[in-house]
Amino acid sequence: MSYKSEYSAQDVTPKHLFLNRRQLMAGAAGLLAAPAFAGTSPYSTDEAPNSYEDITTYNNYYEFGYDKTDPAQYAEALTIDPWSVKVDGLVDKPGTYSLADLIADMPIEERIYRFRCVEAWSMIVPWQGFQLSALLQKLGVQAGAKYVVFETVVRPAEMRGQTGGMIQWPYREGLRLDEAMNPLAFMATGLYGKPLPKQSGAPIRLVVPWKYGFKSAKALVRISLVAEEPQTTWKMLAPNEYGFYANVNPQVDHPRWSQATERRVGGGLFAGRIDTQMFNGYGDQVASLYTGQDLTKDF
Ligand code: MTE
């Protein structure tokens, strides 16, 4: 992961325009076989979301290349229909599910979350999707399961970045079970009331707003319940730089840069950096998960 700050200036969408846009899109979203949104969630921030353009043209998705603009340029090549997700490990209902079956009875809602990348940029993103906990409850987590593992699709013919590079595919991520059951842990299938764009992780991705963005794995094809802490992509690549927990923490710097502040994408050329918040501002909901842990060691 590199640290770049070459993003061009663009203003954050003003709130009133955003609201109009949301009203317009509520209709469009209904056509996606997604149930009507349950309204604004208490878990949503009231900060103004970044524009659709910001969110879909400045991405990290190494399956398509290393530049921020590569995903928007090349992700169209990925076939996302049909799509299936394998569920295995310590679970009552293992199997290979079509995406439609997997999410059929999930209550779709909107969550407007802060999103903080380990590279020290951030955005505000209006996702649609459902709580990971609802899916895990449906699948039936067995006693003995302590972690949830997520794997991304491997399809080098469609993902030009998978033909080389240093990452051992698939992209892997994981959460401790209690983290996965926290109401903030989210599975996104939509963005701005439209189906999730391919560069954003279509057709289904994880979103864990109190952790650095690399935990939020895209294009999931496998979910496993396991007993041991799993190997995860960035920790495998550089264990001294990227930990398993990856909680947003302004007090623990990356070995090569400070995590004390962040640049809000779209904030404009002259916008100053903003202070990074512990757990990305979600401490009230998640701090208790880490009671007794030394977060400088479990970084
Ligand atoms: N998921 C996959 N499959 N491949 C990736 O390279 N990059 C991660 C994460 N999920 C990545 C991924 C990183 S480093 C970040 S910051 C976020 O996706 C970026 O999400 P965004 O492009 O939607 O902002």
Image (spheres, grey):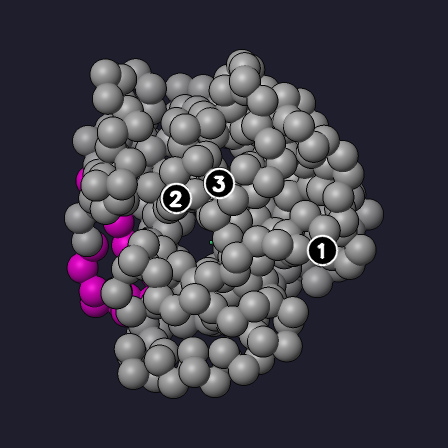
- Helix, strand or loop status at disc 2: loop
Real-space Cα distance between discs 2 and 1?
A: 22 Å
Q: Is residue 188 magenta?
A: no
Going from the N terminus, do you reach mark 3 or mark 2 first?
A: 3
Residue 295 in sight in this render: yes
| Residue 3 in view here | no
The amino acid type, in three-letter code, at marker 2 is: Pro
Q: CA distance from mark 3 to mark 2?
A: 7 Å
Q: Which residue is located at x 73 percent, y 36 percent?
A: 86
* Image quadrant where one finds the C terminus: top left
Residue 175 or residue 77, whichever sits in front: 175
Q: Disc 3 residue type?
A: Ser
- Compared to residue 129, the image places residue 276 above or below, namely above
Disc 1 marks which amino acid? Ala
* Residue located 43% across and 78% down the image: 22
> Residue 64 at what x, y percent from top left?
65, 50
Tag shown at residue 100: 1
Distance in Å between CA atoms under marks 3 and 1: 18 Å
Q: Which stretch appears magenta?
A: 258-273
The quarter holding residue 265 reads bottom left
Residue labelled with disc 3: 133
Badge 3 marks a residue whose secondary structure is helix
Residue 113 x, y percent position in the rendering: 36, 56
Is label 3's Cβ within 8 Å of ligand 1?
no
Q: Residue at x 54, y 37 (%)?
A: 137
Q: Position of residue 230 (x, y in %)?
A: 55, 20
> Magenta region's main secondary structure?
loop
Report the disc number at residue 183: 2
Mark closest to the chain's N terminus, 3 or 1: 1
Mark sitting on residue 20: none
Contact between labelled residues 2 and 3, with CB atoms less than 8 Å apart:
yes
